[in-house]
Amino acid sequence: MQHIFIVGSKGIPGAYGGYETFVDKLTEYHQDDKSLKYHVACKAKDNEEYEYHNARCFNVKVPNIGPAQAIYYDVKALRRCCKYIRKHNIQKPIVYILACRIGPFASYFKKKIHKLGGVVYVNPDGHEWKRAKWSAPVRKYWKYSEKKMVKHSDLLICDSKNIEKYIVNDYKEYNPNTTFVAYGSETSKSKLKDDDQIYEKWLNEHNLKSKQYYLVVGRFVPENNYETMIKEYMKSSSKKDFALITNVSDKFLEELRNKTGFDTDKRIKFVGTVYEQELLKKIRENAYGYFHGHEVGGTNPSLLEALGSTDLNLLLDVGFNKEVAEDAAIYWSKEEYNLAKLIETADSMTEDQIMEYGKKAKKRIEDEYSWKYISDKYKNIFLG
């Protein structure tokens, strides 16, 4: 039996985010596989242990110490992993660290894990050091930390070919050992019908009509290009609404209001968050089109979900997005009027043209990004 220790997600079940969904799906698809045993660190207020999807989940108690909390959590979780491996005399364990937060401690833990007969795998995530939400010193730390994690890992599992290329080129001096395994997505349709009360209620609450709104779902951060999308939408002559599903932060919202004046345009609707997965799927399925403005990061979960559900996808023209969607979407740049014109083009498409894009998008997900396909690839890596 191969033991895999996963550190760096907030834990399973219940926490919502890219890494959390990944760990949840990986353990779900492997829960009946006797050749793999997962041990998952979970950020919590106690040190309890429990089983979920046949994985051993161990809570790591983390004090509220502000931004350093994530680093403290990873370090403490790794200590717990080493202790467990030693105590239970586990042979050839794999310790899989998600994200590059603990670079300054990477060398120390690598030595320790090697001494225990194990190996260190790292998922470098996206360009965290490029994110606008971080201050300059924090960005500097992220870049330094990434460098150390690349140097001291036995294998880097990149969820995007572009990230893999960047790691290989930027850290040539370490000759990093890398492989590519994408993030996954579900391919099933929503269990809700088009006239389901839950969906109808959501539409009525926000004064929206099925197939008459464009949609965006994502974190409310500047590098997801909300400003460009809103400004361009306002310049377009579209008669449809633009619904934004996001966890609004007042400061950034105010900033956007000042820059765009979106509150003067009835079509622009901030509709809050939707955590009910079947409803979210139905909202995506019945959107006229989906916008994706993410500029930073690897394979983005919300893009995969959109390609799996929405027929017409309008994506920011960057390597990450093109790699995932290929010719199953249409692309825009940040140049003035570029997206506005594309919206008008999309508005005048025939039903057949839109359906054709939808077919291609779903095939892309089924062929390369289904959770079954991704979890099989991980099994091959873990069992070597």
Image: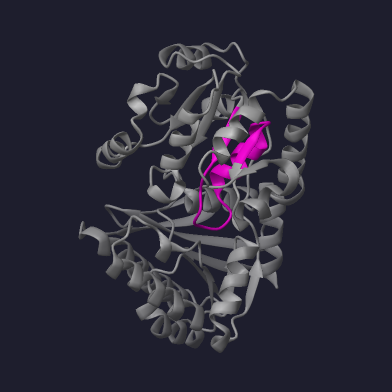
Q: Is residue 262 magenta?
A: no
Residue drawn 28% across the image and 62% down it? 135
- With respect to residue 342, does 190 lie above or below? above
List x then y, in percent, for residue 360: 77, 39
- Residue in view at x 42 percent, y 43 percent: 219
Residue 147 in view of the camera: yes
**Image-quadrant location for residue 269:** top left
Q: Is residue 189 left or right of residue 223?
A: right
Q: Which stretch is magenta? A: 289-314
Kindly indicate the quadrant of the structure image that contains residue 182.
Answer: bottom right
Q: Quadrant of the C terminus?
A: bottom right
Q: Would residue 193 appear left or right of 219 to someone viewing this image?
A: right
Residue displayed at 66% across by 32% down:
312
The residue that appears at 40% across and 31% down in the rendered structure is 273
Asked if residue 143 is positioned above or below residue 326 in the image, the reply reads below
**Relative to residue 370, is residue 166 depicted above or below?**
below
